[in-house]
Amino acid sequence: MKILFEVKRILDQCILGFLLLLPLMVSGAGVKDKVPDEKFRDGVELYSAGKYTEALEVWKSLYNSGYRSAALDYNIANACFKTNDLPGAILFYERALLLKPSGEDIKYNLEVARTMVVDRFNEVPEIFFVTWFNFISLLARTDTWAAVSIITFILFFILLGLYLFSSRYRLKVASFWIAVFMLLISGCTLAFSLRSRYLLNNSGKAIVFCPQVSGRSSPDEGGNELFLIHEGTKVTITDSLKNWYEIRLPDGNKGWVQQECLERI
């Protein structure tokens, strides 16, 4: 009974420490999730009054100041849609979805906008576990996943020390398995953190902004024309050379287009 009591006491201390640090881990997310009220409300009032261009200017100035939020991106996308800027709407719906992958309104409006894109492709399906891994990675902020990883790794070392230096068999066994569990959580959350950072900052996805653009066999105007795509199409950037991007279409075809016709998500 004494051994079980001691294990329980250690676990309680670990959980207490985790709960004490949890507010610090998510406080950054909480601050950034709150759009600066005054400027955002100005945009909402303009949008509600049908002044979509003015609302777009207010929200984009907030975006250009460095602020990032799913709510802000979503409203910019709606304003772009209202002003007939289809590629801009798709771009910001995609950005909003990265910050809030479970947003049903974002998904719905994005699908509506996509129906207006000229190009249609037989898409190569993504492997299901990659889709789920990306979804879970985006459920929390990058620094939140990193903080959880660090804390659980520290708890792993504490429990590992208990396993190595305790003379009680049952305590050693309990601390060993809990340490393994903490190490597993630490590794998973580290992977989620790295993947979240990659998806948000360097996913390689982009939206076509030119009314139409030709994909060529080489990064110059002399290359053979391989395909023709239109504004709003989502592509993947696979390489770059000077002012040209090599892109991959949803159906797997590749070609070179000028950088000025693309905007990275």
Image (cartoon, rainbow, N blue to C red):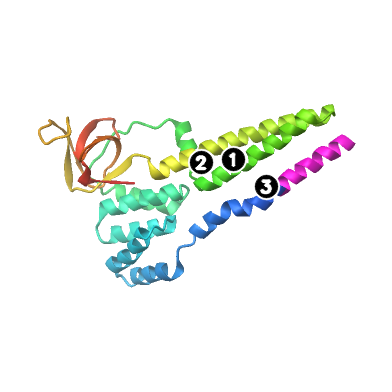
The residue indicated by pointer 1 is: 149
Q: Decide: marks 2, 1 in contact (CB < 8 A)?
A: yes
Q: Nearer the viewer, residue 208 or 189?
A: 189
Q: Earlier in the sequence, mark 1 or mark 3?
A: 3
151 to the left or right of 68: right
Question: Which residue occupies 36% across, 59% down?
Answer: 63
Mark 1 Cα shell of 10 Å, populated few (<14), some (14-19), many (≥20): many
The residue where tag 3 is placed is 18
Q: Horizontal placement of 99 versus 205: left or right?
A: right
Residue 25 visible in the displayed image: yes
Of 154 and 89, the residue lying toward us:
154
* Mark 2 → mark 1, Cα distance in angstroms: 9 Å
Amino acid type shown at disc 1 = Ser
Sequence-earlier tag: 2 or 1: 1
The front one of 29 and 251 is 29
Give the labeled residue for mark 2. Answer: 193
Residue at mark 3 to residue at mark 2: CA–CA distance = 18 Å
Q: Residue at position x 34%, y 56% from top?
A: 77
Give the residue type at disc 2. Ser
Amino acid beneath label 3: Phe
Q: In the structure shown, which secondary structural element does the residue marked by tag 1 occupy?
A: helix
Give the residues drawn in magenta, as a range. Answer: 1-16
Residue 236 % position (x, y): 31, 37
Residue reaching furthest to the left: 222
229 over 170 or under it: above or below:
below
Q: Is residue 224 above or below residue 258?
A: above
Q: Residue at x 81, y 43 (%)?
A: 9
Pinpoint residue 237: horizontal percent, then vertical percent. Answer: 29, 37
Mark found first going from the N terminus, 3 or 2: 3
